[in-house]
Amino acid sequence: MANVPTALFGGTLDGTTPVDSDIAPLYADMPAPKGKIVIAGAGHMSYTNVCSLPPAQFVAKLKDMCFKPGMIDGDKASALTKSFAVAWLNRWVKGDLAQNKALQTELPAKFSAASVVYGGV
């Protein structure tokens, strides 16, 4: 069976699945090809639109996941996540080798909040 290309996303303000204790060990144990994209200032819900929905500001658990001091703007986190995810899928599902440049140099240069590590890309 071939290794399945896998990308993990994490945020430095994610208290639910912290990068150091949850994301990093998973990444270390995964076979290549693999990617780890860590977003500075992202929380657990930064990859969704849930923080922009009105109930988020009133639900205590969501307040902690959505509105911590120093948290990245939701639109920025979404744009970053979508850009890396689409490039990753185009590379590995479509086989578009041009996406290697986007993943390794172009997107990290465009999104300074992203810390990127790849294995076997």
Image (cartoon, rainbow, N blue to C red):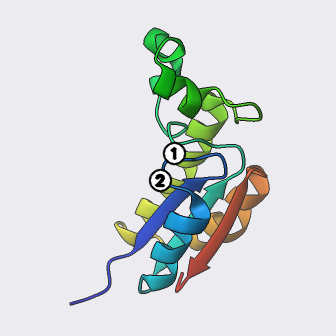
Graded by Cα atoms within 10 Å as few (under 14), some (14 to 19) or many (20 or more), the crowding at tag 1 reads: few
Number of the label disc, if any, that sits on residue 86? 2
Residue that lies at the very extreme toward the bottom in this rendered image: 1
- Quadrant assignment, res 10: bottom right
User: Can you see residue 101?
Assistant: no
Query: In the picture shown, does residue 21 fall above or below 97?
Result: above
Q: State the residue at coordinates (68%, 57%).
A: 107
Q: Which residue in the protein does label 1 denote?
A: 82
Residue type at the position of mark 2? Val
Please tell me which residue lies in front, 111 or 24.
24
Please tell me which residue lies in front, 87 or 7.
7
Q: Are dots 1 and 2 in contact, CB under 8 Å? A: yes
Left or right: 115 in relation to 20: right
Graded by Cα atoms within 10 Å as few (under 14), some (14 to 19) or many (20 or more), the crowding at tag 2 reads: some
Q: Could you tell me residue 9's position as x and y percent?
A: 52, 57
Q: State the residue at coordinates (36%, 66%).
A: 94
Query: In the picture shown, does residue 24 fall above or below 120?
Result: above
Tag 2 secondary structure: helix
Residue type at the position of mark 1? Lys
Q: Could you tell me residue 61's position as x and y percent?
A: 47, 28
Tag 1 secondary structure: helix
User: Can you see residue 29?
Assistant: yes
Residue that lies at the very extreme toward the front in this rendered image: 60
Query: In the picture shown, does residue 18 fall above or below 78?
Result: below
Left or right: 54 in relation to 79: left
- Quadrant assignment, res 76: top right
Q: Could you tell me residue 99's position as x and y percent?
A: 55, 67
Query: In the picture shown, does residue 89 fall above or below 76?
Result: below
